[in-house]
Amino acid sequence: MDVETAEWIIAELNKREEFPVCKLRVTKLPNGEYDCDYYVKPPKFERIRRITGYLSGTLDSWNNSKRAEESERVKHA
């Protein structure tokens, strides 16, 4: 398989997938057809905290009372 065909396959997969394709493996089968395996780049995961019912990635939007509550709570290792 040539580079142009591989690039075309990746472009078509990227149209369908939520995250970009980072690996592509193409195998030619005995009957002349091709089998494709591909892997997508996983999303970057941001820390999510649950404190007294609130889900938040960062403390930026919290008021002073909620920030104090978070800093005073017991943290387990």
Image (tube, rainbow, N blue to C red):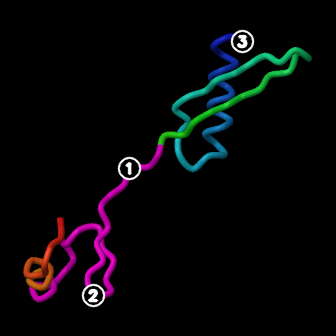
Is residue 21 or residue 25 the one in the foreground? 25
How would you rate the neighbour count of disc 3 (Cα within 10 Å): few for under 14, some for 14-19, many for 20 or more? few
Is residue 52 or residue 74 the one in the foreground? 74
Secondary structure under tag 1 reads loop
Residue ID at (64%, 43%):
15
Is residue 5 or residue 45 the one in the foreground? 45
Kindly identify which residue carries mark 3.
1
Q: Residue 70: where, in percent of width, then height?
A: 15, 79
Kindly identify which residue carries mark 1.
44
Q: Residue 40: where, in percent of width, then height?
A: 54, 40
Where the N terminus falls, by quadrant? Answer: top right
Q: Looking at the image, is mark 2 or mark 3 nearer the viewer?
A: 2
User: Left of 47 or right of it: where is 69?
Assistant: left
Give the residues in magenta: 42-66
In the rendered structure, does residue 58 fall within the stretch colored magenta? yes
Residue ID at (33%, 77%):
55
| Cβ atoms at labels 1 and 2 below 8 Å apart | no
User: Left of 47 or right of it: where is 72?
Assistant: left
User: Left of 40 or right of it: where is 49?
Assistant: left
Q: Residue furthest front?
A: 77
Residue ID at (70%, 19%):
5
**Three-letter code for the amino acid on which mark 1 is drawn:** Lys
Q: Is residue 58 above or below residue 18?
A: below
Secondary structure under tag 2 reads loop
